[in-house]
Amino acid sequence: MSTILVNTLTGTSTAGSIAVTGEGNSTTTNLQQGLCKSIGNIELGTTLVESFNQSSFTDVTTGVFTYNFTNSMANKNHVTTGNNMRNSANGFGHTAALGNDSDTSFTTTSATMIYTSVSNNSEDMRRCMAVTHGDLA
C-alpha cells in the first residue's frame, strides 16, 4: 500500500475543484461540495463541546439554538441538519430548522435549529448537534 503525504490539494484546471471518481467508475463527485462545512455540539445548553467552523452559539429560548459560523457561507441556501440526546431516559427527540415566513432561520453567518421532544414540545436537550453543508463564502 502506498502513502501520499500532502498539506494542500489543488485542482489542475480550477484550483478549488477536485473531482473524485465514484463507485462503478462511471460518475464523479466534487470533493469540496461533499465536505461538511460546520459542526456544532452543545452540551446542556451551556457549552460548545465540539466544533468545526463554529465561533459560538446563541441560546434563543427553550430548545432553540443558533449556531454561529466562524467562516461565512456563500449564501443562506446551505443545508443544516441536527440530532439531539434528551435528558430523560426517553432517548432522542426531534430536530428541525426553525422556519418561518420571513425565512430567517438560516443566514450566511448562522443557522437556527429547534429541538423538540417526541411529543413536539420544545425542550433543552442534554446534547444538541448540527452539521452544515454548502458553499463557503
Image (cartoon, rainbow, N blue to C red):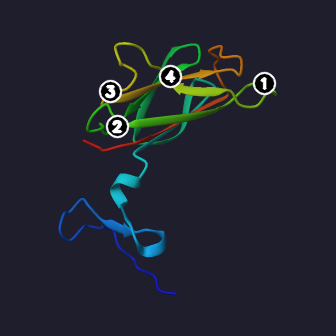
Query: Nearer the N terminus, badge 3 or badge 4?
Result: 4
Q: Residue at x 30, y 38 (%)?
A: 73
Q: Residue at x 67, y 28 (%)?
A: 126
Q: Residue at x 51, y 36 (%)?
A: 81
> What SS does tag 1 mark?
loop
Q: Which residue is mark 4?
A: 65
Give the mark toward the camera: 2 or 3: 3
Q: Which residue is mark 3?
A: 107
Q: CA distance from mark 3 to mark 1?
A: 32 Å
- Quick check: marks 3 and 1 in contact, CB under 8 Å? no
Q: Amino acid at mark 4?
A: Phe
Give the mark toward the camera: 1 or 2: 1
- Residue 99 coordinates in the image, percent (x, y): 44, 19
Q: Which residue is mark 1?
A: 88
Taking 15 as reference, is 108 above or below it? above
Q: CA distance from mark 3 to mark 4?
A: 14 Å
Which corner quadrant of the image does residue 38 belong to? Answer: top left
Q: Amino acid at mark 3?
A: Thr
Q: Amino acid at mark 1?
A: Ser
